[in-house]
Each structure stands twice: as structure tokens, then as C-alpha cells.
Image: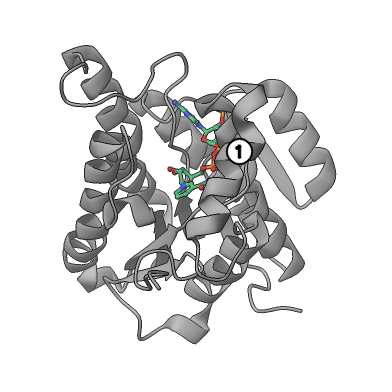
Amino acid sequence: MSKLKNKVAVITGGNSGIGFGIAEAFKNEGAVGTITGRNETTLNNSLNELGNDFIAVKGDVTNLDDLENIFKKTADKFGKIDVLVVNAGGVVDGVAMGTVDNTTEESYDKYMDLNLKSAYFSVQKSLPYLNDGASIILIGSSAAHRAAPGMAIYGAAKAAIISLAKGLSLDLLSRKIRVNALSPGSIDTPVFGKLVPQEQLDQVKQMWIDITPVGRQGLPSDIGNAAVFLASDESSFIVGTEILSDGGLTNISLMN
Ligand SMILES: NC(=O)c1ccc[n+]([C@@H]2O[C@H](COP(=O)([O-])OP(=O)(O)OC[C@H]3O[C@@H](n4cnc5c(N)ncnc54)[C@H](OP(=O)(O)O)[C@@H]3O)[C@@H](O)[C@H]2O)c1
């Protein structure tokens, strides 16, 4: 398996859930590179599983100096970068998602910083270290298309991510850098433990299974497989668009 042989990849949030699934899929296709995150324990555990072809760089994606450091350390170790996966995001630690009647300006800013601003500046800070012809994959969400309770701000940020894939592809056309969005549906990752109490986890996951046409939650490997395609030269004609990997959640209704 060598669809990504010798390609250098950076996966933000590669120490958990979808990001780790992408890192594993990339490794299995011959890529080398960097996973990032803030949690040293999960960074080290993930690195142990990925092996010597990867390094871990600790950093907060909402901090522009940390972003610069991630790309510099990667280039120092591996040379220029071929694939950037902008995956870190989702739930802001200790800040509940809310509805419009109960959301503060501070929590709005924190969700937008993590799920939109950090993505834009991850791309910007990577630019000096990217090879021409690189592939950038922005992790979106089916929540951009289908509203879910209390997730209006998150959904709006992810909708903007899909728009960024278009605008940034245009900005970077002269360097033949492709930017695409990859939007998961409901994927079984640690994020659910950040959203609901332990005793409600099974019930909430079952609710997502019930509304997903294929009858299951996705796995991080489902997103990993789609990311391999977008990272590889097989997708070289795919620019500025979105791939949904959501088991039909967005486009198929289960109404009888
Ligand atoms: N799971 C789903 O159903 C689903 C559906 C659609 C889209 N998504 C998207 O998929 C991506 C990954 O989500 P997931 O489900 O895999 O969630 P997860 O298991 O909670 O992983 C989130 C990742 O983001 C990192 N992260 C969070 N805040 C960060 C910060 N300020 N700085 C640096 N890293 C940060 C976390 O690492 P640290 O905590 O170590 O910093 C972790 O690696 C997110 O963009 C999410 O919006 C998920």
C-alpha cells in the first residue's frame, strides 16, 4: 500500500478520534509526518502506535506562534510538506454549545476561534513550508448542512470551512495547491464524551445511528480512507470542493 509513499503530512489533532484515524490511514499508505495536539499523554500514546515515521508536536491551534512552530518543526525533520489536514476542532474545553438565547459573546468567539479562525491560520502559517502541488484537507462537518440542537455556531463555522476550501484554492492556484473540505457525519470518537455525561453516551450515539441511513456511526478509519484519496495524486482534478463521508446523513431522508 503506497498511495502516499514518501509524502510528508501534518495532521492537526492527530492525537485523537478522526485525526488519529487519518494519521493511521496515511501511515498505512507510506506517509511520514507530524501529529499535533495539546494533550501530551494522548500525543505520546498515539505516537507509540504510529511508530518512528511520525513525530508529535505539542501546540494550541488557536495560537499563531504554536502553528508556526508545528510547521517549522515538521520541515526541520522531514523537509517540505505535501499534505496538510486541518482537523483539530470540535468542542471547546469547558464551554458548552448553546442556543441563541443563552450563548455569550465569549463562547461564540471561542467556538469560532477553534473551528474557523484556527483553520484559516493553519493554512496561512503552513504556506512557507508547503510544496507547490500540496493537498490541503479541511475537516468540515455534516452540521454545516443539517442543523442539530445547540450547534448553530459550530455549524456556521463548518459551513465557512466549506467556503474556505473554494476561496483558498483560488488564492493558491498559482502554486497548484488544492484545498478541499472533507465533511464527516456522526463518527464514533471521544468527542461525544465531551458533549454529554457518561450515562447518556449510549443513548446519544444510538440516536445518531437511528438517523444515519446506513445504520451505523462512522469510524475514524472511514474518514481516514477518504482523506487518503484527497491527499493522493488520484484526486489531482478535485479542487475547491467538499466530500461528505456521512453514511447518507445529509442527503438521504429516512422518512417512511
Ligand atoms: N466526531 C464527529 O462526529 C465529527 C463529525 C463532524 C466533524 N467532526 C470534526 O472532526 C474533527 C475531529 O473531531 P473528533 O470527533 O475526532 O474529536 P476529538 O476526538 O475530540 O478530537 C479533537 C482533536 O482536536 C484537538 N484540539 C482541540 N482543541 C484544540 C486546540 N485548541 N489546539 C490544538 N488542538 C486542539 C484535540 O487535541 P487536544 O485535546 O490534545 O488539544 C483532538 O486531537 C473536528 O474538527 C470536528 O469538528 C467530528
The residue lying toward the viewer, choosing from 112 and 237, is 112
Q: Position of residue 253 (x, y in %)?
A: 37, 70
Residue 130, given in percent of the width and then of the height, sits at 42, 57
Q: Nearer the viewer, residue 195 or 64?
A: 195
Q: Residue 92 in the image: state x and y as whole percent.
A: 42, 23
Is residue 46 depicted above or below 129 in this figure?
Answer: above
Give the left or right position of residue 75, taking residue 251 as reference.
right
Asked if 90 appears above or below 158 in the picture, the reply is above
Query: Is residue 114 in sight in this rendering?
Result: yes
Q: Is residue 161 left or right of residue 28?
A: left
Tell me which residue sits at (57%, 24%) in the image. 38
Q: Residue at x 42, y 64 (%)?
A: 249
Q: Which residue appears at 29% of the width and 24% of the height?
A: 98
Q: Mark 1: which secondary structure? A: helix
Q: Quadrant of the N terminus?
A: bottom right
Q: Nearer the viewer, residue 134 or 100?
A: 100
Residue 107 in percent (x, y) is at 27, 17
Note whether ligand 1 is within 8 Å of mark 1. no
Q: Which part of the image, by quadrant, shows the C terminus?
A: bottom left
State the residue position of label 1. Answer: 203
**Along the line of sight, the residue nearer the viewer: 197 or 166:** 197
Q: Is residue 133 left or right of residue 50?
A: left
